[in-house]
Amino acid sequence: FSYSLLCFFSTQTPFEGYTLMLYNVFFTSLPVVVCGVLDQDVSEEVSLKYPGLYRVGIRNEYLKPAMIGTWVLNSFYITLTVMVMVFMIHTSSIADMSDGTTPGLWAVGFTLYSCIVWSVNLTLGLTVYNWTWLHHLSIWGSIAVLYLYASWTHESSSLDSNGISIDRLIP
């Protein structure tokens, strides 16, 4: 939303359409599913010994409007922080690419995209109570797959859906 606001809602995106699909499928959904299924804040013995612990969920204490508002404000803060950081990095007038040019839309888009994937996965990691090797695999693997995907996209020098070359995805 904030990028669209900066572009005056021109529908220009800083990354390709299939990259957005991969965001929803691999880079953020898989870690959320793994953490949601496997995370536990208390052991099995404690939960069987004290069944009153489930009253918090029955009373819906974690999904009250104030808690949801806190998460929404946190997401706005992260969005503004990432946008300001990325545009501060890439708004230099110095030709800092190896061929003497400044970073283009796809380089800025990949920086923005990778910051978003990092922030989502690290925020998820901060909410995990009980880390297992599957938690590590899903979160760190998601970030690693992002860079494998970017290097594959960079090496293939493919075209996006608009026919624009994305061979300069990684500066």
Image (spheres, rainbow, N blue to C red):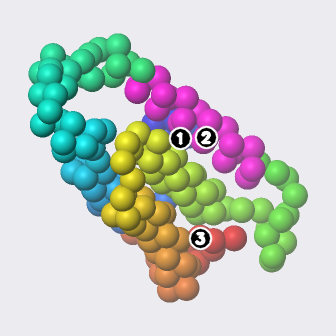
Secondary structure beneath dot 1 equals: helix
| Marks 2 & 3, CB-CB < 8 Å contact | no
- Mark 2 and mark 3: Cα distance apart in space: 18 Å
Q: Quadrant of the N terminus?
A: top left
**Residue occupied by mark 2:** 83
Q: Earlier in the sequence, mark 3 or mark 1?
A: 1
Residue 140 seen in the current view: yes
Looking at the rendering, the stretch of residues picked out in magenta corresponds to 71-90
Magenta stretch: residue 74 in it? Answer: yes
Q: Amino acid at mark 2?
A: Met
| Marks 2 & 1, CB-CB < 8 Å contact | yes
Residue under the point 81% across and 76% down: 98
Q: How many marks?
A: 3
- Mark 3 and mark 1: Cα distance apart in space: 18 Å
Q: Write down the quadrant of residue 52 in the picture.
A: top left
Q: Position of residue 133 (x, y in %)?
A: 38, 64
Q: Please tell me whether mark 2 or mark 1 is closer to you in this view.
A: 2
Numbered mark located on residue 3 in the image: 1
95 in relation to 150, above or below: above
Please rate how many residues cluster around mark 1, counting C-alpha atoms within 10 Å: few if below 14, some from 14 to 19, many from 20: some
Q: Amino acid at mark 1?
A: Tyr
Residue under the point 37% across and 42% down: 129
- Mark 2 and mark 1: Cα distance apart in space: 8 Å
Q: Main SS of the magenta segment?
A: helix
Q: Quadrant of the C terminus?
A: bottom right
Q: Position of residue 77 (x, y in %)?
A: 55, 29
Please rate how many residues cluster around mark 3, counting C-alpha atoms within 10 Å: few if below 14, some from 14 to 19, many from 20: many
**Residue occupied by mark 3:** 169
Q: Position of residue 75 (x, y in %)?
A: 46, 32
